[in-house]
Image (cartoon, grey):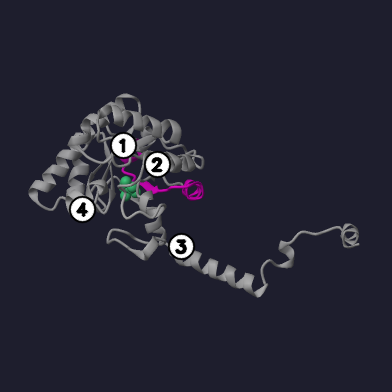
Amino acid sequence: MAKNTVLTLAKQVAEGQKVTMVTSYDYTMASIVEAAGINMILVGDSLGMTMLGYDDTIPVTMDDMVHHTRAVTRATSDTFVVGDMPFMSYQLGVEQALANAGRLMKEGGCQAVKLEGGVRCAPQIHTIVEAGIPVVGHVGMTPQSANSFGGFKVQGKSTENAQRIVDDALAVEEAGAFAVVLECVPRDLAEFITSKLTHCFTIGIGAGAGCDGQVLVAQDLLGMTPGGFKPKFVRQFAQVGDAMRQAYVDYAEAVQSGEFPAFENGFKMDPEVMDQIRR
Ligand code: KIV
Ligand code: NA
């Protein structure tokens, strides 16, 4: 696959081809995504749950994001990597947002950053874009604000709420983002927003097939989500969790029975040297 850039991605969308994106948080997983020819990796702050075992994304720090983004970008060359900005790394103002976006790109090696929020984050997006850092917006159900929504709930069902999400998406485009994630919004609304935006493409998660692209959390699509929780908008494309658990069970049994390691897994010793050792 050729290298993905903001230009190739925009061209792909213009030609009516969908953009594919999945989360990755480490070198091994990102190597597999790169080999699969997926367009984009999101090093999501969902790593708070998938990699660190938190209940939500709130505790995730810039240090966490830099650490995982670096691991991912060591594995990628063609995949376009987006680093996620964690809670309270951009809310304080444009200077804080730019400093942290710059850090994620310099130290993490990503090609773009993502932050949650529309109208209220437009100044931050504008400032980061002006500095030469491509930005992905994120509107609809924005997990860092789940406490304000009263939980992880579908957004945009009422007229007022739907209008707010349209305004947010337009503000993100106006501020200069090249793409925007639409999370957990009704499919008709996502399709409408996708048609309204002209130079910013949409990446849906729980937003229907009318978006320009799709993103899923790797653990969800692989069927290895801790606890096995499966939201309505997820499809498990494999049962990797079951396959891994079985491999560990088989390994433990083989060790207990003495069947592993087998003779061929061991190293040969020169018999003469061994004789001298025994003496
Ligand atoms: O952190 C994440 O994984 C995300 C996606 C769900 C869009 O923001
Ligand atoms: Na996120």
Q: Secondary structure at mark 1?
A: loop
In the rendered view, would you say 131 is above or below 145?
Answer: above
Residue 39 colored in magenta in the image: no
**Mark 3, residue position:** 240
Left or right: residue 28 versus residue 156 is right
The span from disc 3 to disc 4 (Cα, nearest Å) is 29 Å
Q: Amino acid at mark 2?
A: Met
**Residue 204 seen anywhere in this rendered image of the structure:** yes
How many C-alpha atoms fall within 10 Å of the one at disc 2: few (<14), some, or many (≥20)?
Answer: many
Which of disc 2 and disc 1 is earlier in sequence?
2
Can you give x and y, in whole percent of width and height, for residue 210 in the image?
Answer: 24, 49
Numbered circle sitting on residue 65: 2
- In this view, the residue in front, 227 or 154, is 227
Give how far apart the Cα atoms at labels 2 and 3 are. Answer: 25 Å
Residue at the location (51% across, 69% down)? 246
| Disc on the earlier residue, 1 or 4 | 1
Question: Which residue has dot 4 on it?
Answer: 187
Percent of width and height locating residue 22: 38, 49
Q: Is residue 1 visible?
A: no
Q: Which residue is mark 1?
A: 89
Name the kind of residue labelled 3 in the image: Val
Which quadrant of the view contains residue 195? top left
Q: Quadrant of the C terminus?
A: bottom right
